[in-house]
Amino acid sequence: MSALFDPFVDPSIKDSGISKAYARRVVDRIDVPHSTDRPEYLIAPISSRKFLLLLLLMFVGVTGLLARLAYLQLWNGVSYREVAEGNRTRLERLAAPRGIIYDYNSNPLVKNIPNFAVTITPSELPRDAAERDSVIAKTANILELPPSELETQLEDQPDELYYLPLVLEEFVPYEKALKLTTELSSLPGVTVDVQASREYADAEVFSHVLGYLGKITADDLEEFDADAYLLTDSLGKAGIEWQYEEELRGEKGRKQVEVNAAGNDIEVIAHSDPQPGTNVELAIDGDLQRTLYEELGNYSDRTGSPGGAAVAIDPRNGHIRALVSYPGFDTNVFTQGIKSEAYQELLNDERKPLFNKAISGEYPTGSTFKLVIAAAGLQEGVMTPEQTINSTGGIQINQWYFPDWKSGGHGVTDVRKALAESVNTYFYIASGGIYNEETLEIEGGLGAVRMKEYAELFGMGALTGIDIPGESDGFLPDPEWKESTIGEQWYIGDAYHFGIGQGYLLATPLQVALFTSAVANGGTVYQPTLIEQFSNQTTDESYAPEPTELSSGFIDPYYMNLVQQGMRQAVTSGSAKRLNSLPFAVAGKTGTAQVGGTEETHSWFTSYAPYDNPELVITVLVEFGGDGTEAALPITEEALKTYFIDS
């Protein structure tokens, strides 16, 4: 091999680099083996495709890191900061005493009672897996629960609630709570709290009014103000407890405590007292409520009736004095956590104890609806105060016969007698008119459209707006509905059935009580309410909501007075003579509603007293109770005695 050229003495070298000539000479003078002889000397350049792929992978990786950083800092920064702060401070929520619910006579219907609850805070559990498992195992052993059950509860808690305490078990017996308390120093993250729970007096009697408390869920936190609750809290699940949850719950206090590494308190950094919930005084008269519930129960037990409902209203303002659905259920069982088997038993009970029949049950009204037809017929001039009809036992329309309930009829009848004796023939003519055999046309009568319009003015066919959940709106038929739904035209028989509270017409007991109240007070429909007033526990200030009118002035007072006279005559000489022995004047209307497709009937009676200065309306429905005088009337009698005589 020739000697290597020395670049340092070659005159052709420029300061800027090696010349092309020099480059050629260097290559020529270096003994490089041929590529075919020594392939390991060759270096293959990286392809542009692989290079771009490498750049793409680097870009994705960096972008992912930046996105994760942004998520942690911007979206979850507050949460993680709170967790970090929790390593040296603990924020404790101080429970506010829940407001008490009273009846109209200031008798408490609920009590706040102590409840030992065991809670666990996931963020305060040991980070070491073995230590964490030991804490869970010890806690489960004391509570006599499988550790897997506790693990499941912890896993089900959403990540964003990781730092909040979770209830493992409540209503823990005192002995278990005491044993756990002595072990707490070795169970970081586990606490035994004394919480307030509800105890309901006469739970079944007031079940559909008061409702009950239940443990809050993660879904509840999304629906309600999450800052006002912890997962250890309970909230209203039905009735007044649900409707007025915001007023009853109060406002939690806060205590920020500095803790050491072991989680033990060092000192209180900040503190604010809880604000008690508002007390609620109901318009419900407790004694009247109990009497109606007991009487419905007695009749049901004696006859096998599925139960019934009763509503009592002050016609002067719409305040509800009683709201009964029989049978009820034990709300205390729900508050303490009802077992699945017991809940299924309630669901499968044919008497429907969980169903509020007073506001959710929809029934044919029977002859109670004749109050509406009488007022509407007089107002529209379809019937006049002096007009009479001759009841001979029914009406014949071609091949169809529409009977009176009394064989042979009631004789000459005006509007007062029609109401007092519940004369069907009068209301057939008032509602549907009469068929003229000469002209082959129907003459007179309100007709379906006007009957529906007046029924709506009296509060039917729509929600009344009562202040508890679950209300139904009933149903008012008309020709358009029948043709579009059933595919049949509207016949005169449909109008006749409508006019006596049968056929397709449906109403809730609350709606029947509402239109009876409008008759009693002279023509004003008030929105029903269960609230008498609210009372602030701290300031003792009270607030009473003003009555709300739904409609008024649609019936001339003179005509309404005639309807009132008919209801009074029902007691003095008609179908409700049983009440004439009471030491105060009562007005009433019976109702016997045939259950569609059967021979069974529901028993209705709606009434008010005193007649000259009405202050109470009572409407009673007994399912499959027979004639209105057989079941509903005797129950009403006992309720009137309780309210006006015994109290």
Image: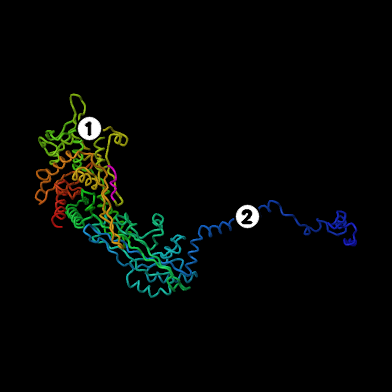
The picture places residue 577, in percent across and down from the top left corner, at 10, 46
The picture places residue 278, in percent across and down from the top left corner, at 31, 59
The picture places residue 587, in percent across and down from the top left corner, at 14, 46
Q: Nearer the viewer, mark 1 or mark 2?
A: 2
At horizontal 29% and vertical 51% (from top left) the residue drawn is: 467
Extreme residue toward the top, this view: 438
**Residue 88 visible from this viewpoint:** yes
Name the quadrant of the N terminus.
bottom right
Magenta-colored span:
461-466
At horizontal 48% and vertical 65% (from top left) the residue drawn is: 83
Name the quadrant of the C terminus.
bottom left
Secondary-structure class at tag 2: helix
At horizontal 45% and vertical 60% (from top left) the residue drawn is: 158
**Residue 332 visible from this viewpoint:** no
Using a 10 Å C-alpha cutoff, classify the residue at mark 2 as few (fewer than 14 neighbours), some (14 to 19) or many (20 or more).
few
Using a 10 Å C-alpha cutoff, classify the residue at mark 1 as few (fewer than 14 neighbours), some (14 to 19) or many (20 or more).
many
Q: Nearer the viewer, residue 298 or 613?
A: 613
Q: Quadrant of residue 196?
A: bottom left
Q: Which mark is residue 509?
A: none
N-term-proximal mark, 1 vs 2: 2
Query: Which kind of residue does numbered mark 1 sit on?
Result: Ile
**Magenta region's main secondary structure?**
loop
Q: Which mark is residue 492?
A: 1
- Marks 1 and 2 sit apart, C-alpha to C-alpha, by 81 Å
Within the magenta stretch, is there residue 106?
no
Q: From the viewer's perspective, tell me whether residue 433 is left or right of residue 9.
A: left
Query: Which kind of residue does numbered mark 2 sit on?
Result: Phe
Residue wearing tag 2 = 59
Q: Compared to 426, does 158 lie above or below?
A: below
Q: Nearer the viewer, residue 6 or 16?
A: 16
Secondary-structure class at tag 1: helix
